[in-house]
Amino acid sequence: MSEQPKVVILGGGTGLSVLLRGLKKFPVDITAIVTVADDGGSSGRLRTELNIPPPGDIRNVLAALSDVEPLVEELFQHRFNKGNNLIGHSLGNLILAAMTNITGDFVHAIREMSTVLNVRGKVLPAANTSVILNAEMEDGTIVSGESKIPFSGKKIKKVFLSPDDIEPLPETLEVIGEADLIIIGPGSLYTSILPNLLVPKIGEAVCQAKAKKVYICNVMTQAGETLNFSASDHVRALYTHMNEAFMDIILVNEEEIPDHIKSLYEEELAKPVHFDVDTLTSLGLDVITDNIVCYENSVIRHDTNKVAKLLYGILQQELT
């Protein structure tokens, strides 16, 4: 059997998990590189109390790539809604925290859980330690903490990580260098995607990698992060933080969002991203447009199967 093509995906949050559920159905070797900047909710509590990296985004990715009975995945994702100390925690977060305590190492804990859940692919944290995401606002003020940044009420100028001595896993740099395709997104631009690229050496490795880089642009803007952003604004923000134009392809949605969905999103100051194709082309990007959204309880999601099929098509073109 010939070796499967290697795909590396960087991100965090719901967007990454949604994408992986579709991509794992194709004959590809997947590595997901996941942000460890989360400091809210259950992840934030465990991070603070146990001094471990936040497990939430990792948990979601493990569940998305797992090949187990639905009830086992449901158990892993179960969130307690009763109990003073348990309320808000998901069982998977607690299991990852326990496994980290047992093994003494977060990465080792992820590997063990990957075996238990029969994960199709590899899940790597962007670093083996918690990182703090900071944002410099346009008025010069600094907001620290991933969960606080979107609620500052100010426009982000740039984001950066602390401490200064964050180290990626050597394995992470290796898989980026060996990748046949690198996928960035979908996900919150400043709080899910950039925290991966800003880990020292990871961003540089992505920029220098021989593989084509695909950016899956968000469908909707996000208040506190990308208010009124066009697709090219998203790309420019990535380029500014990396000091380099490094993307080859951008995947954007061309399907009209129904008015009743738009009105729901307007309540949180979100609206469809304007896909300025001419500007994207002028930035040197190959623009791929398609109907790539679906709706779950009036929430817009990328259609995991359509997006995965498009990405696999890109990969096949690159390998022929």
Image (spheres, helix red, strand yellow):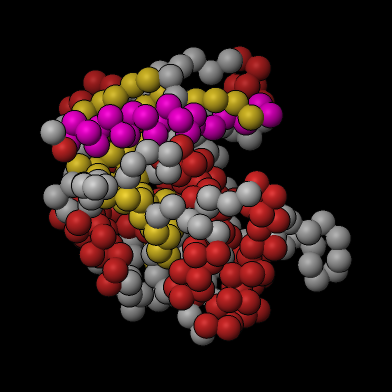
User: Considering only vertical position in the picture, is 19 above or below 39?
Assistant: above
Q: Is residue 61 visible?
A: no
Left or right of 286? Residue 64 is: right
Q: Residue at x 24, y 36 (%)?
A: 315
Q: Residue at x 34, y 29 (%)?
A: 310
Residue 91 point in image, percent of width and height: 69, 63
User: Considering only vertical position in the picture, is 134 above or below 138?
Assistant: below
- Quadrant in which the C terminus is drawn: top left
Query: Was residue 215 drawn as part of the magenta stretch in this picture?
Result: no
Could you say which is closer to the camera, residue 286 or residue 119? 119
Q: Residue at x 58, y 83 (%)?
A: 102
Query: How many discs mark residues in the rendered view?
Result: 0
Residue 61 point in image, percent of width and height: 51, 53
Q: Residue furthest right?
A: 83
Q: Which residues are magenta?
A: 297-318
Residue 79 point in image, percent of width and height: 73, 56
Task: Tell me which secondary structure the magenta stretch mostly adopts.
Answer: helix
Q: Is residue 263 visible?
A: yes
Left or right of 275? Residue 319 is: left
Q: Residue at x 46, y 17 (%)?
A: 255
Could you say which is closer to the camera, residue 185 or residue 110? 110
